[in-house]
Image (spheres, rainbow, N blue to C red):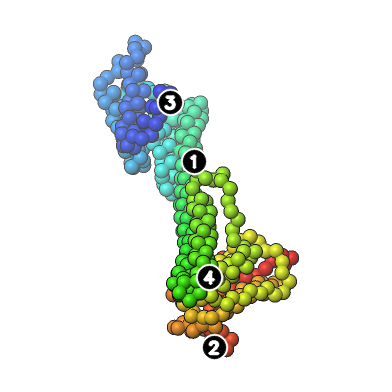
Amino acid sequence: MTRRPAERLRALVLRADPRWRDVGLTLLVQVATTIPFVVPRDPAYPPATWTAYLVTTLGNAPLVWRRRAPVTALLGVVAAGSAYQLALDGPGQPLPYAALICVYSIALLGAPRVRLAVGTALAVLIPVSVALNSGTARELLFALFVFGAAFALGRLQATRQAYTAAVEDRAEQLERANRIEAEQAAARERARIAREMHDILSHAVSIMIVQAEAGPVAVRRAPERAEAAFEAIAETGRDAMAQLRTMLGVLRAEEAAAPRAPQPGIGGLPALVDRVRASGLAVSYERTGEVRELPAALEATVHRVVQEALTNVVKHAGASAVEVRLEYGPRELAVRVTDDGRGPARAPAGGATGGHGLIGIRERAAAHGGTAWTGPGADGRGFTVLVTSPLEVGT
């Protein structure tokens, strides 16, 4: 949309350097004060002189510094005006333009004590100036009104600028806060995706490696078991690919309307246990307490915690058996995975370990306000992963 000429001119003026704007304002006032000199005068009055015009010009010149030194500019304007009034008999002016602009500038830019001093001085000088000129009440009231209006307009503009600056600062702070929040949200989402990718790929690859290593042995010793091992590898790969497609599909905007597979939950644990059991590890699964429906996010966390714990058993524990227990308490859910393997090699009970999987387990537990504990089993053998998460009353 094309802007009107007046809007373009205003935008151009606002973008200009303040010093050039002051020069332009000074020239505009000079044009206004020149008009009485070029308009023919009554023959009863003395003719306008170049000396009077020069003094008038000198009285306008201080406006160039009205932004940088408003009080000094006002003093210069008053001095030139006094000299003109007392020593010359030139054309008068309808309004003291330069003095009014200086008073406006002081009200806009001056410190409180400067404004008070100037206001007090004007309250004294205006009656004196009127008394030396016409001495009429009409001129006194008019002078008090125009100078008071100039001062009031300066204060209103100062208030408006302060309000605008506060609004812009607030908007900048909100924009900065929104940008930080968006960056933090993106970082959290990247961490979540990284956890999901790690859990899916680490579990699937671990099971496939175990089955692949067992395949040649099965072919030589028990050919009937080799087919089951290779089928387990294929099934694990297909499941991992399906989960990866679901996750990657969420990241593609063009597929936003495509159907999504549900997040894995507690209902998928038996199938997960079966896949691990097919690798030759004896896995038991048990749920105790009052089994109830849980939020989808918590169910997905439980599934991933069990998946990661079983993956660690397959990869690191050297175990022959592992027990998975879900314990539903009145106010919390406990997920316990215990194996009979070699146990923690370096980490003390309850201590942090350096693997991404256990870090992910702790992050998932913390996301639901829960805790994660890892350490040796009850008899000092094996390894236990225990995650507890609070449950809402009535869940």
The residues tagged by marks 4 and 3 sit, at their Cα atoms, a distance apart of 83 Å
- Verify CB contact (< 8 Å) between mark 1 and mark 2: no
Please identify, in this view, whether the residue under mark 4 or under mark 3 is nearer the observer: 4
The residues tagged by marks 2 and 3 sit, at their Cα atoms, a distance apart of 81 Å
What residue sits right under mark 1 in the picture?
160
Quarter in which the C terminus is drawn: bottom right
The tag on residue 380 is: 2
Would residue 158 be visible to someone looking at this image? Answer: no
379 vs 146, left or right, is right
- Three-letter code, disc 4: Glu
**Could you say which is closer to the camera, residue 246 or residue 127?**
246
Q: Tag 3 or tag 4, which sits nearer the N-term?
A: 3
**Could you say which is closer to the camera, residue 388 or residue 182?**
388
Please identify, in this view, whether the residue under mark 1 or under mark 2 is nearer the observer: 2
Residue 132 percent coordinates (x, y): 41, 30
Q: Secondary structure at mark 3?
A: loop
- Three-letter code, disc 3: Arg
The residues tagged by marks 2 and 4 sit, at their Cα atoms, a distance apart of 38 Å
Residue 231 percent coordinates (x, y): 52, 64
